[in-house]
Image (cartoon, helix red, strand yellow):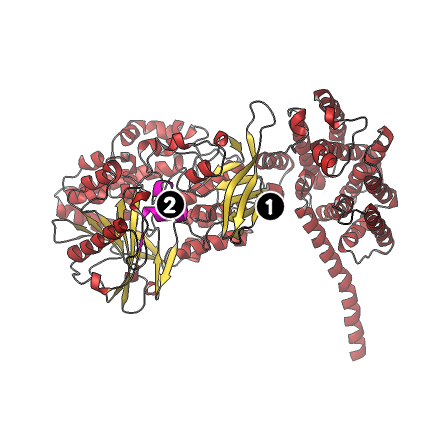
Amino acid sequence: MRAAGEAQRRNEARARAPRALDAVADEVADLVIRRYSTSFGLASRLLAGDVRVHVRNVYAMVRVADELVDAPRPDGDAGQQALLLDGMHADVCAALRTGHSANLVVHAFARTARHCGIGADLVDPFFASMQMDLERAEHDAASFAEYVYGSAEVVGLMCLKAFLVDEPDPQARYVQLSEGARRLGAAFQKVNFLRDLAQDHDHLGRTYFPDFDITSFDEHDRDRLLDDIDADLAAAAVAVVELPSSSRRAVAAAHALFAELAQRLRDTPPSVIRTQRVRVPGPRKAQIIAQAVAKGGNVTMTAATRGKVCVVGGGIAGLATAALLAQDGWDVELLEQHAELGGRAGSWSAEGFRFDTGPSWYLMPDVFEHFFALMGTSAAEQLDLRLLDPGYRVFFEGHEQPLEVSAVRAENVARFEALEPGAGQALEAYLDSADEAYAMAVDHFLYTSFEEFTSLASRRVLLKGRRLAPLLLKSLESFVAARFDDPRIRQVLGYPAVFLGSSPDRVPALYHLMSRMDLADGVLYPQGGFSTLVDAVAGLAREAGATLRTQVEVTAVLTEPPTRRGARATVRGVSCRDASGQERVVEADVVVGSCDLHHLETRMLPAELQTYPERWWARRDPGPGAVLVMLGVRGELPELAHHTMFFTRDWAANFDDVFDARQVPDPASSYVCRPSATDPSVAPQGHENLFVLVPVPADVALGHGGVDGSGDAAVEQVADAAVAQVAAWAGVPDLADRVVVRRTVGPADFAADLNAWSGGALGPGHVLTQSAFFRAGNASTKVDGLLYAGSSTIPGIGLPMCLISAELVLKRLRGDRSTGRVAAPITKEAAR
């Protein structure tokens, strides 16, 4: 019995071994098709499962053989290539007989060939055409026909065998459709011959078209060749509609892609065709694929069907863009110049303290929740969020008692009433209006790229037009002043303008919607700091398949010039430099700039391709700069809440100094975050972590910060004044003496580290002329395939806006011009 059992196990192991080898061989073939993806390889991703595997296996064998004859010859000996090609041919023939090969690509092909009925009648002409590449540099009509048959038409016939393998009478169907398969293969090959004129002639020394002289190539030659290609495509179209449903969508998509290429070639001057490879931009490819899907039913959309995206910048907008696009099926590579991800949402550690160096307010939780839902998860699964109560504390110059803003709306109503009789009821009405404005913004203004102005023409917006117009034309300051008299209340309700990179007298009253976030929704904090948010989004991007690379500086956006009058340039990737100084090119169908828009436009693009040149920025408001002060303090500081504001009596003068006089206010209003009040992990036991922000002009001349007072004098003076203010107003007279860690950051650091325009701390301010459709758009008007995300573009500044900007890139690439949110979750299996 034991011997019988051992024998059975050995037999089962022997049976599993071929299946394992088959699986590995299929994976290798899949790798080949992904690395050498063409328009036909792209469309093949729409094939049904088993058919797709067989087509990959055919293509991989063809691709490897083609590389043998096209690869550079280190020793200059074409005879060695001929020996390699003969060896591969012999290996394929042997594998057709035995079903096995030590060459995994050949093994995969042989398995497909034996299953689908592909024999030597197709294999031999293919290898004969490859041999012609080693023997002939030019062709006459007869040799050209022989070459096209062997190199392309028989490949179409091999694929046709795979398409029909499960048909009731595959041989009869093969006879019926073989002419169409041959003509489609011929069209593909001839299109590529025309696209690759320069490469074939200049680098390989070949000219394929008979009776053809590249030096005199003109419009007559171009049109003559394309007429022949169009005839092939027309003949093939008749057969495409007769294919089984498992392959019809893919072949229709491939046909459409090459028809698009043929039309672009016809629109391209011969002088350009002679020197450049004509391409279909990534977004247009995706549109063609989507149209094939819509006509043919549901299929899996993968990275290969979508195309390659390069995201420039690893801040929260770049990470969210990478995550959403990878989840939607794009092949995404993100490049970040620093060693750490996060951008403005960075962190710094010293002596047991861990400081957030950027955002510290978790507002608009519904935006975060929606983003996580798109990725198939939730904020609760990704973050440990704590509701802060009080949400924040405010010290007012000239008033001994601070105001605490509660996490409960009713309590805030009561506190406002205590400051000013009637203010409680007024606040209720104010927050109701804020709720209505926020809902309208979410439904019509935040989640749109304004490609169409339907968001402004909806019935709901038009019905609210009488109330909406004043909210756009009045300032937030005047809107608040018309409802409240107490200056403390006015300051609390006006402060959200700072989140928008401006001042209450400069932002539209529509932004009173911000008050619902702190006075009604409450303020949250992610335990561990905002670096946990960065880690969560980066982790989701990686899980979705995005590649995130750090210490890679992008130096230029690469483009191809327009191929016809009236057309635009097309993006083709970026050039970049790694930490070792090595230069390389990352090719891409789409480039998304999530870095500072001014830097990308004016430093990475030539003047003629800049949608937003320097003269555009000269008329714009960069928003405020900031001096940041990170303090590690010995002992506890109960005088400060998690968030504490210090408002000067004449804060209008503060804003005028920052935005008009462009000088540091004295005294200055300031903000202090004490995360150690909520999170013990950010400071050693018995110590406090303080982050101080003082708004200053966005002016790099103010200088850099430094550690332990080593920054430029102007920056350190601002920091000293802020520490003294906190000490005096909050009643901590020995604060400066208790500081054990200190680091400052100035506007010059924002410019040097983040390429921030003018050293701005947040991004262009939300004045009326820089809000909604007046703000910089998220697509270049000069370069197809170049898109933008982040605080410089729509919808604006702040973490929630950056998440929305990533979703707007997704919507633009999908061709989605709606004003609402994308349905959650995004699934790679979803058909579009």
Badge 2 amino acid: Ala
Q: Which numbered marker is on residue 792?
A: none
| 199 to the left or right of 624 | right
Tag count: 2
For disc 2, the marked residue is 751
Crowding around mark 1 (Cα neighbors within 10 Å: few <14, some 14 to 19, many 20+) is many
- Which of the two discs, 2 and 1, labels the residue nearer the N terminus? 1
Image depth: mark 2 or mark 1 in front: 2
Please give the name of the residue rendered at 53% of the width and 37% of the height, measured from the top-left corner.
814
Give the extent of the magenta segment. Answer: 744-760
Q: CA distance from mark 2 to mark 1?
A: 35 Å
- Secondary structure under tag 1 reads helix
- Secondary structure under tag 2 reads helix
Percent x, y of residue 680: 32, 65
Task: Residue 402: say if magenta.
Answer: no
Above/below status of 566 relative to 330: above
Is residue 300 visible to us here?
no
- Return the residue nearer the eye: 301 or 654: 654
For disc 1, the marked residue is 303
Badge 1 amino acid: Ala
Percent x, y of residue 62: 77, 45
| 572 to the left or right of 539 | right
Percent x, y of residue 676: 30, 62
Quadrant of the frame with the N terminus:
bottom right
